[in-house]
Amino acid sequence: IAPIHVVGGGLAGSEAAWQIAEAGVPVVLHEMRPVRGTDAHKTEGLAELVCSNSFRSDDAETNAVGLLHAEMRRLGSLIMRMGDAHQVPAGGALAVDRDAFSAAVTAALEAHPLVTIERGEVAGLPPADWDNVIIATGPLTSPALAAAIGGLTGEKELAFFDAIAPIVHFESIDMETAWFQSRYDKAGPGGTGADYINCPLDRDQYEAFIDALLAAEKTEFKEWEGTPYFDGCLPIEVMAERGRETLRWGPMKPVGLTNKHNPTVKAYAVVQLRQDNKLGTLFNMTGFQTKLKYGEQAKIFRMIPGLQNAEFARLGGIHRNTYLNSPKVLDETLRLKAEPRLRFAGQITGCEGYVESAAIGGMVGRFAAAERLGRPLVLPPATTAHGALINHITGGHVTTIDEGPRSFQPMNVNFGLFPPVLGVPTKGPDGQRLKGTAKSQARKRTLSARALADLETWLGGTALAAAE
Ligand code: FAD
């Protein structure tokens, strides 16, 4: 069997190579370190964790990343096996001894008879005779390869910085205060004229909001990141520093809107949220990209009327991050539409985080192996954490309303990406109606149980497909 080539031996590439080899297909893993470094990696180990040593919550019942851990364990993940073997105490989180973890992943891949590791940069498009390739070169993809990818996708479809605005769970927005309306009731392509949720601020609320923004602690860029601001994409706190009225003339302009709860009073400023996924469970705060510290963001954004109880699926950020406009350029099994011999995996596809990158790596490894073996590719159901993430990357994101390609931003796994679930218990064991956190926990438990059951069915189905 001809080998599959995996470019990048990080979290995604290591998992992809493992899954391919375990499927019985030879794999060549190309990692450029130590021949060439990145600005964040410090070692030559595979699956190096460049910052925190945490895989986040390990609670598979009520936390989406914990559920992803459970699914990955079920799929025989190397990253999870070595994470479990080298964990350090961290309460309900799974944290690992980073050096021991990376050494163990490297050793397991080196020892696998179907894995060959080649050290060296793939400094342009992979050679034409590599017919089945996975590119998993991460947020710090080397410039030569990035340029080659940009040449295939068009420059606009490959970003070098993210500009992440916070995303709020729809069910946590107070719609007694906020209302649906597009400015001037304009219906853009795919829109209805009532595509935005509007949160009104009066003058005192606006002034207090600006004071809080100016006083808040910000995250600094790392020296090597530079300062990537460009007009049209400034962080809100930088806009506020340029003048107290700047936001009111920018993303918070109160024009073309009538508060349906209070039609005679004009809002002094308005925060708009736009639907972020096709399911309509998530809304992003339009134009609210920010470098404020996470704790500050939650506190300050809850000052906005309508968002006082907001639950955030993602907080804002701006980082050096090479990633594709995947919903547009990748097909459903993460192949580049413009050149289908190339698949993508990991953070470059627009997922975020060590665990998510590894999960996508594993799944894409399975797809590539199935293709090599001539077996049908069966996507995991969207009700599983793997399926929900893939759906975010390739299909579930809304890009049609009136935003251009930049509206797709990287995202961690979260329950807002899952389709709604039936059968959530409404009462506790004491017969009392569930409210607040208990209600939300019951929903998450039901979503998790469905995910694990559907993963089993899918695994059974793919095993049958493999046997055919
Ligand atoms: P990586 O793990 O970066 O792996 C990509 C690999 O490809 C690297 O080993 C690189 O050397 C190699 N490579 C690049 N170009 C080439 C080439 N042309 N040829 C051959 N090899 C190449 N996530 C978290 O969950 N927690 C955090 O605390 C966290 N902190 C981060 C801090 C920074 C500074 C950055 C940049 C990201 C951080 N992330 C964090 C986000 C992200 O989840 C990780 O970067 C994760 O490692 C992504 O996995 P990956 O496999 O896609 O990329």
Image (cartoon, rainbow, N blue to C red):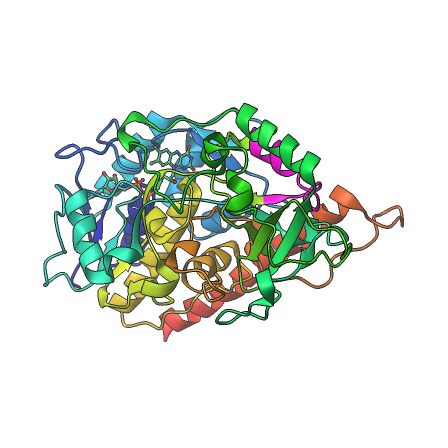
Give whichever of 282, 403 is nearer the camera. Answer: 403
Apparent side of residue 257 relative to residue 136 in the rendered image (left or right): right
Tell whether position 351 is magenta. Answer: no
Please tell me which residue lies in front, 319 or 186.
Answer: 186
Q: Nearer the viewer, residue 180 or 439?
A: 180
Can I make out residue 388 in this image?
Answer: yes
Asked whether 310 falls inside the magenta stretch, the response is yes
Q: Is residue 315 shown to the viewer in this render?
A: no
Q: Position of residue 422 (x, y in %)?
A: 70, 64
Residue under the image location 56 percent in, 49 percent down: 253
Quarter holding the C terminus?
A: bottom left
In this view, 383 is above or below 138 = below
- The image shows residue 242 at horizontal and vertical percentages of 45, 32
Q: Which residues are magenta?
A: 296-312
Report the residue at 23% width, 60% height from top: 154
The quarter in which the N terminus is drawn is bottom left
Quarter of the displayed picture in which ligand 1 can be seen: top left
Q: Residue at x 63, y 32 (%)?
A: 207
